């Protein structure tokens, strides 16, 4: 294993293989709810835009076309309550995972620097800190941690709606972190970046988020009118079934976007031109997002009801593509729950992947037929 690889944890999904084999042995086959990969068709409006831009012999622009960046600006104003975003402060990325993994390195973090991320979290926040030689730290109260005055925190990752637990941060919670980061930067004379991973923002289920929307870290109620030190990360994989396109972007503080752009120019980290055109088309069309949200709403209601009937509890899960689940009796290890579900031919992801020993993450990303099959098995059990 190479020098970088030696400092990284094993890829967690490799450890699910025996449970997947157990689930596949079910007479009616496996219902794989372990990974949040979309299964529904890519919308026609997006495929048409991709095809129209298919004749693309030249190098695309790293910064993204003006059409793409203006589509992002319009989307933030229309869907996220963020008016007046500077198009120059938008940068397309090759999916959001690579940005999460390499942001600490691109910001110049290293030994002695701390990267905060949620306690129950997508593993890439931890991996990105390690790749940079920085120290990852689980923390569900970053405002309090920043107020301690140690001066070692350089990057705070927020994830709202959260993967895996569907937690949503309210405006006052976001504002408290932003204010604490700015106060720490002023006190210590070192920048503190707040980056918010908001990839599930269009998939809110519970009040008040389902009606009022999920707030962004760039919302003026959060920022006080300034995007200084702030980045919002977004992906179209979930809302538009574009995981295969690797269509995403980061936006916020122009003083942060500029150096990220320079690094990406040197490294050749460029979103293909046809994908940029498809991304702009997807962001301009709200109808397909509403249609997909309704699909997930139906699947979520069916699967959640079956889980609860079978003696499971769903915690949080206010938004996003997952049900954060545990046995009602409590205390059972997440791997044991994964094994129990695999016995029904249902594959889930253990909370241990995300820093939680009790819950399992159950995805809504399966067809209507397979979700119904999973619900029937749970109720039959």
Image (cartoon, rainbow, N blue to C red):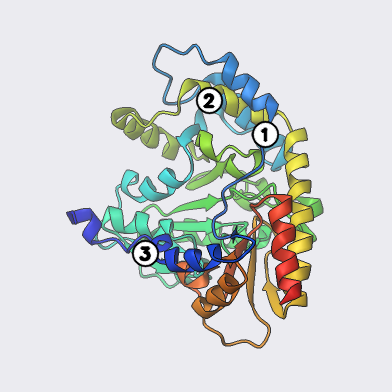
Report the residue at 72% width, 81% height from top. 311
Q: Are marks 3 and 1 in contact (CB under 8 Å)?
A: no
Q: Nearer the viewer, mark 2 or mark 1?
A: 2
Placement of 288 over or under 167, stated as above or below: above
- Of the pair 221 and 269, the residue shown nearer to us: 269
Q: Which residue is mark 1?
A: 75
Q: Earlier in the sequence, mark 2 or mark 1?
A: 1
> Residue 87 in the image: x percent, y percent?
56, 27
Q: Earlier in the sequence, mark 2 or mark 3?
A: 3
Label placed on residue 276: 2
Report the residue at 45% width, 65% height from top. 16
Quadrant of the rendering where the N terminus is positioned: bottom left
Report the residue at 26% width, 63% height from top. 112
| Helix, strand or loop under label 3 | strand
Is residue 296 at least partly visible in the picture?
A: yes
| Helix, strand or loop under label 2 | helix
Q: Nearer the viewer, mark 2 or mark 3?
A: 2
Outermost residue, front side: 27
Label placed on residue 136: 3
Q: Earlier in the sequence, mark 3 or mark 1?
A: 1
Gap between marks 2 and 1 measured at Cα: 15 Å
Is residue 189 at least partly visible in the picture?
A: no
- Of the pair 228 and 42, the residue shown nearer to us: 42
> Residue 150 in the image: x percent, y percent?
36, 70
Report the residue at 65% width, 52% height from top. 366
10 Å neighbourhood of mark 2: few (<14), some, or many (≥20)?
many
- Of the pair 306 and 259, the residue shown nearer to us: 306
């Amino acid at each position: 294993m190479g020098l970088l690889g030696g400092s990284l944890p094993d890829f967690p999904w490799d450890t699910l293989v025996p449970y997947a084999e157990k689930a596949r042995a079910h007479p009616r086959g496996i219902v794989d709810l372990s990974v949040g990969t979309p299964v529904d068709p890519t919308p026609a409006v997006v495929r048409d835009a991709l095809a129209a831009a298919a004749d693309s012999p030249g190098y695309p622009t790293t910064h993204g076309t003006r059409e793409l960046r203006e589509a992002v600006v319009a989307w933030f104003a229309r869907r996220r309550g963020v008016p007046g975003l500077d198009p120059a402060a938008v940068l397309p990325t090759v999916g959001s995972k690579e940005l999460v993994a390499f942001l600490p390195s691109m910001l110049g973090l290293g030994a002695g620097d701390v990267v905060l991320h949620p306690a129950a979290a997508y593993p890439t926040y931890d991996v990105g800190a390690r790749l940079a030689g920085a120290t990852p730290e689980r923390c569900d109260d970053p405002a309090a941690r920043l107020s301690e005055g140690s001066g070692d925190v350089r990057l705070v990752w927020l994830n709202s709606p959260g993967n895996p637990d569907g937690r949503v941060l309210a405006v006052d919670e976001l504002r408290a972190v932003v204010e604490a980061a700015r106060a720490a930067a002023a006190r210590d004379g070192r920048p503190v970046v707040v980056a918010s991973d908001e990839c599930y923002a269009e998939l809110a289920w519970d009040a008040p988020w389902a009606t009022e929307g999920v707030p962004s870290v760039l919302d003026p109620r959060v920022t006080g009118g300034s995007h200084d030190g702030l980045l919002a990360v977004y992906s179209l994989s979930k809302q538009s079934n574009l995981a295969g396109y690797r269509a995403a972007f980061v936006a916020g503080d122009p003083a942060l976007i500029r150096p990220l752009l320079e690094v990406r120019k040197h490294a050749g980290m460029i979103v293909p031109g046809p994908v940029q055109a498809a991304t702009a088309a997807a962001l301009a069309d709200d109808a397909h997002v509403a249609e997909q949200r309704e699909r997930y709403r139906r699947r979520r209601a069916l699967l959640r009801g079956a889980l609860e009937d079978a003696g499971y509890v769903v915690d949080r899960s206010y938004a996003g593509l997952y049900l954060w689940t545990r046995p009602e009796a409590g205390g059972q290890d997440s791997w044991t729950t994964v094994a129990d579900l695999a016995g029904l031919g249902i594959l889930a992801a253990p909370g241990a992947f995300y820093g939680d020993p009790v819950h399992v993450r159950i995805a809504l990303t399966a067809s209507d037929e397979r979700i119904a099959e999973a619900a029937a098995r749970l109720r039959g059990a």
